[in-house]
């Protein structure tokens, strides 16, 4: 009542603009929301259970587990297969399981699917097959030579080159190349033909789908060393099929670069495909094997 009387007494002495300001000020003073400011339209609900746990926690290490959202629509980006497997595991009744977590249970691990008929293969035989697999299915590799360039003479020099060991249905295990003498790598090979070729599994889908870093030992990589030589006339037709069937764009490369075919005569083979060091593979066993990932 006193506020209204005050408004009536002041109406004669204030302008319309001042009157509006006065009304707004009075509304704010009488509002039950006094002292609150809306800073964000998004709200987060915290259950009493989580609130009690947060209050009772005295160290920061416990916070990530307590703050894990088991009902949120926001999920970390992992392969769909991981969530599928995790969902199937949750659907099975397990005694004594009081809390379910929505995050994948194997976010930093993976398993290789078993292949029918490979249970009796020894680790060394599997390594040999993996080596042939990497040689056949990699479309490019990293070739290292001894540099002949003036400023870095004698220093290892690396280059990425397209590679093929044969058409998709005919693996030979021998890396073929289509190169030009205008390339520094080829210039190096003309003086010292010894080179090493690294073929990574990271190029395929396996490491990416299983969230494995290319440098992780589980993401296999093969290194071949040997002599780089020009393809002899009797192998020229096969070299063309090997390279052009896997890299059709090569047919359209400028002819004035004087392209020609080379291959590597393999002398040593190293494979890294698991923890525990590098496997050495005998060249004879390598050429006998059939390409297989398992």
Image: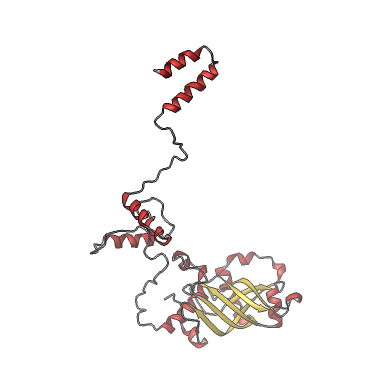
Give above or below for 59 relative to 130. Answer: above
**Observer-nearest of 86 and 179:** 86
Q: Which residue is drawn at 45% across and 37% down?
A: 38
**Observer-nearest of 74 and 176:** 74
Give above or below for 130 relative to 57. Answer: below
**Where's the C terminus, which quadrant?**
bottom left
- Which colouring convention does the figure follow? secondary structure
In the rendered image, residue 222, in percent from the top left (x then y), is placed at: 53, 77
Kindly give the residue lying farthest to the front in the view shown: 2
Give above or below for 101 relative to 226. Answer: above
Kindly give the residue lying farthest to the right in the view shown: 150
In the rendered image, residue 128, in percent from the top left (x then y), is placed at: 46, 82
**Observer-nearest of 231 and 86:** 86
**Is residue 232 in sight in this rendering?**
no
**Observer-nearest of 222 and 228:** 222
In the rendered image, residue 78, in percent from the top left (x then y), is placed at: 42, 60
**Where's the N terminus, which quadrant?**
top left
Q: Which residue is drawn at 35% across and 82% down?
A: 120
In the rendered image, residue 244, in percent from the top left (x then y), is placed at: 58, 69
**Is residue 51 in sight in this rendering?**
yes
Callout count: 0
User: Could you tell whether 40 is left or right of 145 in the image?
Assistant: left
């Amino acid at each position: 009542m006193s506020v209204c009387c005050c408004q009536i007494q002041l109406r004669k002495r204030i302008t319309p603009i001042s009157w509006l300001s006065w009304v707004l000020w009075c509304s704010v003073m009488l509002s039950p929301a006094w002292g609150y400011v809306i800073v964000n339209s998004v709200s987060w609900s915290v259950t009493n259970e989580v609130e009690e746990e947060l209050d009772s926690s005295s160290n920061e290490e416990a916070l990530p587990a307590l703050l894990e959202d088991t009902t949120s629509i926001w999920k970390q980006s992992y392969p769909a297969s991981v969530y599928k497997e995790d969902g199937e595991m949750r659907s099975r009744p397990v005694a004594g399981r009081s809390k379910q977590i929505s995050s994948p249970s194997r976010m930093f691990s993976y398993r290789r699917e078993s292949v029918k008929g490979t249970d009796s293969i020894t680790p060394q035989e599997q390594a040999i097959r993996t080596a042939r697999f990497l040689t056949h299915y990699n479309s490019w590799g990293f070739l290292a030579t001894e540099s002949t360039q003036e400023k870095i003479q004698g220093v290892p020099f690396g280059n990425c080159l397209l590679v093929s060991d044969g058409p998709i249905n005919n693996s030979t295990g021998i890396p073929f190349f289509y190169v030009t003498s205008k390339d520094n790598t080829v210039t190096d090979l003309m003086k010292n033909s010894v080179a090493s070729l690294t073929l990574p599994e990271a190029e395929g889908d396996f490491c990416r789908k299983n969230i494995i870093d290319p440098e992780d030992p589980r993401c296999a990589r093969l290194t071949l060393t040997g002599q780089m030589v020009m393809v002899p006339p009797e192998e020229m037709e096969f070299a063309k099929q090997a390279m052009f069937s896997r890299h059709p764009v090569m047919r359209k490369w400028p002819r004035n670069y004087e392209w020609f075919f080379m291959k590597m005569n393999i002398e040593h083979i190293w494979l890294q495909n698991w923890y525990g060091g590098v496997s050495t593979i005998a060249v004879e066993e390598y050429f006998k094997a059939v390409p297989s990932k398992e």
